[in-house]
Image (tube, rainbow, N blue to C red):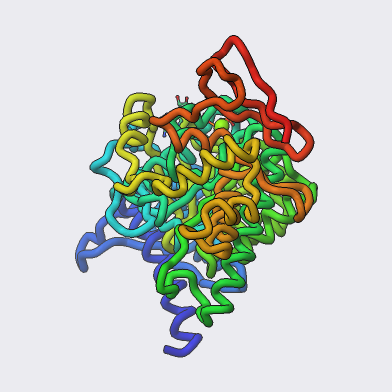
Amino acid sequence: MDYQQMAQNEVVGYWRAILATLKQRGLLRERPRQGGMVVPHALAVMDQERVLFVLDMMRLGGVARERWLDRKLWHQWRAALSGRRVVVADGYGLVVVVGRHPGPVVAKRLPSIISLTPDVIPDGLYTVCLGMDNRGPVVLDLAGSERAILCGGCPGGGKSNLMESIILQLVTKHTPDEFQVAIVDTKEVDFGPVFARLPHLFMPVAHTMDEATALIGAVEQERLRRQAVMAHEGVNDWRKLVEPFPLLLAVIDEAADFAKTPVMDVLVESARKGRAMGVSFVVGTQLPSARVIDPQVRAALETAVAFRCRTHIESQAILGVGGAEKLDRPGLALAYLGGRWRTVQTLLVDDDAGGDLAQRAAVPQAPALSELETVLVRYAVEALGGRFIIGQLYQEFAGQMSKRALTKLGQRWEVRGWLTSPAHATDPRRVTDELLSLCSGDLLPGQGTGNGDRVIGVIGGDRDAPVVIGAGDRQIQEVTG
Ligand SMILES: Nc1ncnc2c1ncn2[C@@H]1O[C@H](COP(=O)(O)OP(=O)(O)OP(=O)(O)O)[C@@H](O)[C@H]1O
Ligand SMILES: [Mg+2]
């Protein structure tokens, strides 16, 4: 089809929608003898941005002038034209102006509460249900077309709830071998204990700015590591690896904290380049301003989901167009997905259901640590003061594990937050609380107390801070290393 034909079809399509709306509103009348309708006539002019229908004032189809200027009619046209802006200009004659680029139409007739329940979770790998629009469930592919999501809107709009819903759906159907999540929650009000206990955590949930900085850095490090592995294996997509990496989803609840900082640059870099390495992002902000969502952030987070916004300008910062200022209740969101604008009632995570789903989290049958690994951790705590010293571990376990395997184990555990990251390459890593908790069941016998006290945890683990072993809650014993 040539260009002229396409343009003609487009113009005719708009005009038909305009007439159909007039008919629907009962503004057109039947032709008495020939049948059909008496319709207005117009001359169409098209440029890059819009089509102008210059009405023939002698042949207005019997539609009174003031009817054309009724804003309710314009809104109805807009809905019929997939959200394109329509206005009627009144000068020497009447001109119907139709914007050529579709915009969002906010649909409101959706239930105001749709709960997240196991049956709404879609089957596909790494897919989740965002919620319902007027055509049914809206599915997001966190490893594909929706792998980098920006969600914004006023406080109380439903951003954190959406993030929780995405995480819970993914942990329900993927094991930690297939899916890992890194969470930044600097507000510390959302992502409760249910999330802190997920076996899918890439690192402990970050609550402070320092932790958040470390977490975002670790995600980027992991992306670079994956890139190197893939280069070595000669593949250009993580899913082509013989043993694919888990999808790593970084969920950052409030991006305004990082606006214009180097951490934001790292985040943007990671989000921009993470596609091939299975690194995905969901980033939220309650300050949808140009300061937070600058062009780099916008470009790196390709999918935008807007909850209620205060102004047209805020909506524009998130979506590139207005519309989200018309959303009138929590959980209702506007997004451009699958080639069109959708108003979606997102799924509500109620406390019970959330807890239930987390309980059902898909975990591998095997325990997190093998028997040998448990013994190794115990040795590190008992004999090495909590330090994971590869040389010494190797000496002790030479027959059972190669030095290379120990080195790899150390790296893997560090990435997971099971060992600390030392400030200097020559310093040993240290066993963290989290790793220790995985040796649960058999509490580690305390050492050197001679009174049968038991070690209940290893706190700290900074390079400078000594490792402290708690012996009951009455007495804390310091093991200097
Ligand atoms: N999908 C939903 N359906 C119904 N109600 C919802 C939905 N999402 C959120 N809400 C309601 O809105 C409240 C606020 O939601 P949420 O904490 O997710 O907002 P937020 O955008 O993260 O706010 P803030 O910016 O203050 O962190 C929830 O406690 C809940 O009552
Ligand atoms: Mg929130």
Q: Residue at x 56, y 33 (%)?
A: 433
Q: Position of residue 31 (x, y in %)?
A: 25, 61
Residue 172 located left or right of residue 209: left
Marker count (numbered): 0
Could you say which is closer to the camera, residue 174 or residue 37?
174
Would residue 434 be seen by someone viewing this image from the given angle?
yes
Q: Residue at x 61, y 65 (%)?
A: 225
Q: Residue at x 65, y 57 (%)?
A: 220
Would residue 132 be seen by someone viewing this image from the given angle?
no
Could you say which is closer to the camera, residue 4 or residue 200?
200
Q: Quadrant of the C terminus?
A: top right
Q: Residue at x 50, y 36 (%)?
A: 327
Q: Position of residue 198 (x, y in %)?
A: 44, 38
Can you name the residue that lies furthest to the bottom here? 2
Q: Position of residue 265 (x, y in %)?
A: 74, 55
Q: Position of residue 310 (x, y in %)?
A: 62, 34
Could you say which is closer to the camera, residue 280 or residue 217?
217
* Above or below for 257 versus 20: above
Can you name the residue that lies furthest to the top here? 474
Q: Quadrant of the N terminus?
A: bottom left
